[in-house]
Amino acid sequence: MFPAHFDYVRPATVEEAVKLLAKHGDDAKLLTGGHSLIPAMKLRLARPQVVVDIGRIANLSYIRETGGAIAIGAMTTHADIEASKTLRDKSPLLAETASHIGDAQVRNKGTIGGSLVHADPAADYPASILALDAEIDVVGPRGKRTIKAVDFFVDLLQSAVAADEIVTEIRVPATAKTVAYVKTEQKASGFALAGAAVVIGPGGVRVGITGVAATAYRAAGVEKALAGQTSLTPDLIARASAQAAAGVDALGDIHASPEFRAHLAQVNTRRAIEKALTRA
Amino acid sequence: MRRRRWPVADPNTTPYVGRAMKRIEDPRLIRGEGTYTDDLRLPGMVHAAILRSPHAHARIRKIDTTAAKAIPGVVAVLTGADVNASCGLVPCAAAIPDLKAPKHTVLAGDRVYFVGHAVAVAVASDPYIARDAIEAIDVDYDPLPVVTNAEDAVKIGSPLTHPDLGSNVAYTHNVSGGGNIDEAFRKADRIVKHRLYHQRLTPMPIEPRGVVASYHTGEGTLTLWTATQIPHLIRTLLPGMIGVPENKMRIVAPEVGGGFGAKLNVYPEEALIAHLAMRLHTPVKWIESRRDNAAATIHGRDQVGEYEVAVKNDGTILGLKSKTIADLGSYLQLLTPAVPTLTGLVLTGCYTIPAVKMEIVGVYTNKMATDAYRGAGRPEATYLIERLMDVVAQELKIDRLDLRLKHFPAPGDFPFPTSCGLVYDSGNYAAALTKAKQLANWDQLLKDRAAARAAGKLSGIGVSTYVEICAMGPSKAMPAGGWEWGCVRMEISAKVTVITGVSPHGQGQETTFAQIVADRVGVPIEDVVILHGDTSVAHYGRDTYGSRGTAVGGTAIVMCIDKMIAKAKTLAAHLFETTSDHVVFENGRFTSPGVTNRVITWPELAGEFYVAKNLPPGLEPGLEASSFFEPQNFTFPFGTHICAVDLDRDTGHVKITKYVAVDDCGPQINPLIVEGQVQGGIAHSIGQVLFEQTIYNEDGQLVTGEFMDYAIPRAHDIPDYILGSTVTPSPINPLGVKGVGEAGTIGATPAIANAVMDALEPLGITHMNLPMTPEKVWQAIKTKT
């Protein structure tokens, strides 16, 4: 488990990091926790020429309330998100989701920004980011821009963040309390075979699904079936949840067939809605 | 959560034996102060990396090492053509008649036979450069047809793993015993048939393998540190491979981070790295990566069988027939072909079954070799007989416990000869079953299941009553001798140094042996040191496997102590001016009641032995004894496991709601260590029954080559165990102990599987292959509802 040769740089500011990315282009990789990058480098599946460690940049790790949102610095660890009183009190879905990620060691080092940009199809956050309708700020040579969650996950292991951009902040609504994340683990890795995140609010129900397809997605069929409904009866929830993988090209591998993943999406959606309602 | 505490014994009272003591070896391991193979740093040491085949079967047209050799820091790049003539063949110690065996060279010759087959080795000044170098080797492969399924491999027209052998069948082994099997089947009211599959498993010790070799050119001596269970067997077998004589070879097993049978082997790398150290005149280190461990360290199990039971309508079993196909992989490692034959030895389990017939076909496929993995053949046998007992009970609609009880030999029937040709040493199978029922609150368990079922839930209870083979073993049954050696020396300071030929790597014998010695010699346990795992210290031994350490190795030490005390009594008698038969030894004190009031203790006596100024004529100085113990039989631990499960209809998830194990391993030296062994064994079974499996795709690619894809049990998979024991001493050794290293995984697999099948029984589901994953359970439920 010995990576190929690489150079290591540690910029002090976001601006400096952006310049380094611009300079090295595809040869550079950001180190933002390292729980996907370093194993890939050790297996020599990833061979960056330059590793840009942004772990020491000040002010990228925070959780604070701003207006109607909670802003989370991109380098905030899963453990900090899991433990955040602000999140637990005002918008607990991300904290609940973080508690499902890996193990304590992973949660102590892995960061939300790093995880989101990696766009692993079975990562936990994407389901919740989608259900929360979060916003993601990125900074690059062209300045700062904000990406909506629905536009963020482009394809397998591909996010809307360009190679020369850095995620700086994630914002979620501060009023989402009727929420839940329910997940079936892939037994070996602990990643999601199917994870369903649910946010129930005055505007309706939003459902994010991860693990099932090449990217996490909003379960439009479920949301539509529940739209405008004032009373979420068990029967209605069951019928709506049956749409959790409708029209989705489900993944299949040694851990689960496409059929089973799609089925688990339905079951976990139903269970997540039921669980969220207990928190209403 | 409920936390159980072990009773803390007063540390100042003896005996130590029987006390639940924490392990002496643990603090250094927990604090990271243990020395594993990868911790070794020798002056001038270089690092080896091995290039492995990406193909399951291919001809090697050409290997070009030019670019690799040109990398700065590279010391050597070598292929099979360079080293195989100097390294001899990898040994297989199993004696199977008419065995067809391929030549197993340390690096591939002109063909590769499995993904992970070692093709070339690069040696460099650091491990990074060694990795760079193997990437720069250009191998031109011509892929060949592949066979990965043993049942396909025996069909006519199958691709051949080794075309030069002419067939994929390595051997056909027939076991038959007891009465006339044909007559048994003629007299039967009914023939119950079943098919069972034991999936392939990857042992996955947390420490992968590793080797460091150092050759002293002037002395012609080789020192080899290797993460192994068997330093002595390697010292016996490696000379034949690399030409260094046994008495110029030192094998050291430092701390070994898990074996489970995977390190009970002589691997190509042990010869290769030794050869490199000799060839390059500098120490060489090779540490296996996790991926290489998954691909090129032995796998376990992988048997499929068709079974027939001849029964009378009252449940009386008249005979058992089986046909098993065992997937050996592509090569024979140390015990590869022998493991399936062990299944044949305990086929009848703990039951009186008058006639048996078993055919075992060992088959080559383009996969890594299978070999001994925790339980080695006994889990397979126990799973099949315990599943069959449930299937028979279900078909005949008789109680499964009654069926088992009906076929148990009575305590008075021991020593009990079986139809498979063994003689079970001692046992009280009904007592273990009764105790397990008590601990499980059996009647309540049945009521709970009925209530759950009435509420529409899928709830099941599984039982397994097992017997297994431990304390391996009598030399007549073991390929390289089954005795054990030990040495006990009292130093001049009255400290006791014990040397054992077993090679513990997690079994805790630094503690259990110290308990035995402290009691029998009568010294504080802190004064006892147990040395092992270095052939220059422990000159002889047969190492650790087959749950033999305490029953065989411990007995050798008891024999040493007896000799040492006898010698000490001779000197005590001389000092008392009497004869030995008037000397009494008790709790470390020598007295001679009626002769003198004088008391002689060890410090005084040890001093006299080494100062040697006052020894009687004929008595040698020094106080040490060594012994070889040859067991006259195996031992046969047994027990009953009970497991209750709930199934999630929606997700197929199996939740273990209760787990009770009653194991009888004879008297327990240290109940805490016994419990640890049982717990770990059950964990292995939870993995095997519910999720673990080694998967090769049809091209022979290993798709479970890392922990991202190969699931091992984790803490949250383990239920709260309720453990108990009964104590039936073995007559085979003076300690009466039987062994417990593998019992958990032998007893537990069928208990858990039977529980899942019991939960599915109301749906009419009678069969499911291991592992019983959520998807399989869900699919089964879906097809029946």
Image (cartoon, helix red, strand yellow):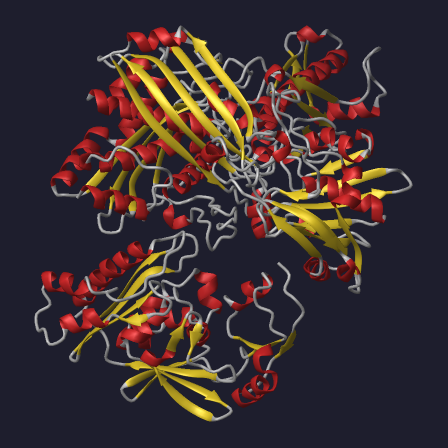
Foreground pick, B205 / A151? A151
Foreground pick, B747 / B242? B242
Q: Is residue B713 above or below residue A39?
A: above
User: Residue B333 occupies which quadrant of the picture?
Assistant: top right
Residue B424 seen from this side: no
Q: Picture coordinates of residue B485 (x, y %)?
A: 68, 23
Foreground pick, B107 / B168? B168
Q: Picture coordinates of residue B482 (x, y %)?
A: 62, 21
User: Residue A100 occupies which quadrant of the picture?
Assistant: bottom left
Which residue does the image show at 61% across and 35% down from the upper left?
Answer: B162
Q: Quadrant of the N terminus of chain A?
A: bottom right
* Left or right of residue A156: residue A173: left
Q: Quadrant of the C terminus of chain A?
A: bottom left
Q: Residue furthest front?
A: B157
Q: Picture coordinates of residue B776 (x, y %)?
A: 31, 44
Which residue does the image show at 67% across and 28% down from the upper left?
Answer: B501
Foreground pick, B524 / B67? B67
Q: Picture coordinates of residue B426 (x, y %)?
A: 44, 14
* Left or right of residue B159: residue B602: right
Which residue does the image show at 64% across and 61% down from the upper left?
Answer: A2
* Left or right of residue A222: residue B707: right
Which residue does the image show at 86% across and 42% down from the upper left?
Answer: B216
Q: Is residue B439 above or below residue A230?
A: above
* Left or right of residue B176: residue B261: right
Residue A235 seen from this side: yes
